[in-house]
Structures are given as C-alpha cells and as structure tokens.
Image (cartoon, helix red, strand yellow):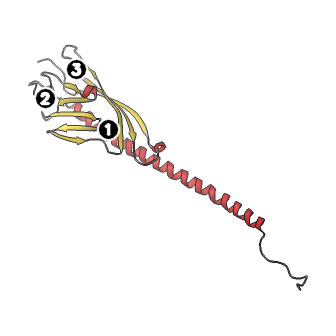
Amino acid sequence: MLSSNYKQKGYTLIELLVAMAIFTVVLAAPTGFFVSALKSQQKALASQELYDNISYTLEYMSRALRMARKDFSGDCITSNANYLLTNNGHGIKFRNYNGECQEFFLDSSDDRIKEVKDDMILPLTSSNLKIISFDIGESGWSQDDSYQPKVTLFMEVEGTRGSLSELHPKIKIQTSVSQRNLDVKY
C-alpha cells in the first residue's frame, strides 16, 4: 500500500506538449530570420557579381569604341566608315586604335557578349550572367551629317547563379560613347 506522503513525480502528457510547442516557437523564429538573412546575402552577392561584370564589360567596350578609327582602306568595314552594325543590330564592328579589326556581339547560343579580335572569339561576360538583350543605337555614322559618331549600347542582363529564380537580379543598362577622333571627310 502506498503512503499518503508519496507524490508521483513526472510530467503529464499535456505539460510535455505545451513545453514542446513553446520550444518549437522559440526555435522557429530565429531559424526563419537566419534563413531570410541567408537569402538576402545570396541576392546581394548575386547583384554585386552582376554589377561588377557588366561594369567591366561596358567600360572595356566603351574604351575600345571611343578609340576606334575610321577605316580608310575598307579592309575591316565599309571604306571611310567608323562603325558597322552586325548580327541584325546585336553587334558592332570597327577598326580599333591599333588598326586591328574588332567586333563585339551577342552570341545567342549561350547568351553572352563576345569579342572577335585577331580572329579569336573571347567571351566578355561571365557564364553566370544571361544577356537577355543587347542592342546598338547609332548616331552620326554618316559622312554627310556633320555629327561626331556616337554609339549607344543597351543591355538587359539577368544573373543566373543559384537555383532560386527569385534570387536572380535583373538590370537594364545603357551607355553612350562618342568617338574621340574627329570625324572629318578626307
């Protein structure tokens, strides 16, 4: 027989369920915050990679286009021209400051901007980027308009790093470059 002084020690099922629920709520809040912080960091890193790569690409192309020379001989592009649109307006060809024939174009097979120089094709954009559109605007390219040649580059770019599409940054960017050398008739 049990004495009346004896008390049962332990927890009831209800007490265990309440304790587990409180523990779960206390643990879930910081976990959700941590996952949210990780996604934000991944998106920030993807955006930084996109901005760095596109900044480099546009600066490289702008410098080359700014220093382009008129092709007097017609060996590279039309005689006495500064630039030539290629790939249905998605590429531009010109004679660079070293006198070499150079071209920038959108390669639709892998959605990257590429450069052709010395008969070599080299990608300018990372494989972690997808060039959605690359268009070239022209102004002053005619020898009869008395305007300095100007090239406007339009790009829409999306980062592709990671498996979550909501983390893929996307930007539209435009820059204009006028040729450094005066465009005079010869």
- First reached walking from the N terminus: tag 2 or tag 1: 2
Q: Which mark is residue 76?
A: 2
Residue 161, how many percent across, how many down? 40, 47
- First reached walking from the N terminus: tag 3 or tag 1: 1
Image depth: mark 3 or mark 1 in front:
1
Image depth: mark 3 or mark 2 in front:
2
Under mark 1, the amino acid is Asp
- First reached walking from the N terminus: tag 3 or tag 2: 2
Q: Is residue 33 above or below residue 4?
A: above
Q: Which residue is found at the position 14% from the left and 39% from the top?
A: 119
Q: In the picture, residue 6 is in which quadrant? A: bottom right
Classify 10 Å Cα crowding around label 3: few (below 14), some (14-19), many (20 and above): some
Q: Which residue is found at the position 80% from the left and 77% from the top?
A: 9
Please indicate whether residue 24 sits to the left or right of residue 101 in the image. Answer: right
Q: Which residue is found at the position 36% from the left and 39% from the top?
A: 130
- Mark pair 3, 2: CA separation: 16 Å
- Mark pair 2, 1: CA separation: 25 Å
Under mark 2, the amino acid is Cys
Q: Are marks 3 and 1 in contact (CB under 8 Å)?
A: no
- Mark pair 3, 1: CA separation: 27 Å
Residue nearest the observer in this picture, 119 or 97: 119
Residue 81, how many percent across, how many down? 16, 22
Q: Which residue is mark 3?
A: 141
Q: Which residue is mark 1?
A: 111
Under mark 3, the amino acid is Trp
Indicate the secondary structure of the residue bearing disc 2: loop
* Quarter placement of the C terminus: top left
Q: Is residue 50 above or below residue 181?
A: below
Residue 36, how many percent across, how many down? 55, 50
Residue 89, how many percent across, how many down? 27, 26
